[in-house]
């Protein structure tokens, strides 16, 4: 919590609210990646009993969670500087 407060010093309201929002999105995305991965890479006994539509749906959920995690961790800040440094 101290790091969140320290990281918000000198920023405006939008940046201050984006940090906790991105952190919560990243944490939820990690949880959903784990949950959606179970039908795909879980125990063989579990995967054998599942219908195909569950595996396809889990794959779609897994891919969307990974994309959400990637966007939360590596946001597009709108700058086009070398090495992604925004100033």
Image: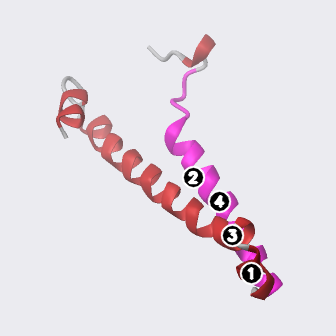
Answer above or below: position of 22 versus 84.
below
From the viewer's perspective, is residue 85 above or below residue 62?
above
Which is nearer the eye, 25 or 12? Answer: 25
Between 37 and 56, which is closer to the camera in this rendering? 37
Q: Are marks 2 and 3 in contact (CB under 8 Å)?
A: no
Q: Which residue is mark 1?
A: 45
Instruction: Say if 20 sits above or below 85 in the image.
Output: below
SS class, disc 3: loop
Label 1 element class = helix
Residue at 25%, 28% in the rendered image: 7
Q: Is residue 75 visible?
A: no
Dot placed on the residue nearer the N-terminal end, 2 or 3: 3
Check disc 3 and report the residue beneath it: 42
In the shown orientation, is residue 29 left or right of residue 52?
Answer: left
Verify whether residue 22 appears in magenta. no
Q: Is residue 43 visible?
A: yes
Residue that carries the numbered disc 4 in the rendered image: 64
Q: Is residue 39 left or right of residue 33?
A: right
Q: Is residue 31 above or below residue 87?
A: below
Q: Which residues are magenta?
A: 51-79
For residue 68, which numbered disc appears in the image?
Answer: 2
């Amino acid at each position: 919590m101290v790091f969140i407060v320290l990281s918000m010093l000198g920023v405006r309201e939008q940046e201050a609210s984006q940090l906790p929002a991105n952190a919560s999105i990243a944490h939820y995305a990690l949880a959903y990646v784990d949950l959606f991965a179970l039908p795909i890479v879980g125990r063989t006994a579990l995967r054998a009993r599942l219908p195909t539509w569950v595996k396809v749906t889990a794959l779609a959920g897994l891919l969307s969670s990974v994309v959400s995690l990637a966007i939360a961790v590596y946001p597009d800040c709108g700058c086009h500087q070398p090495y992604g440094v925004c100033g």
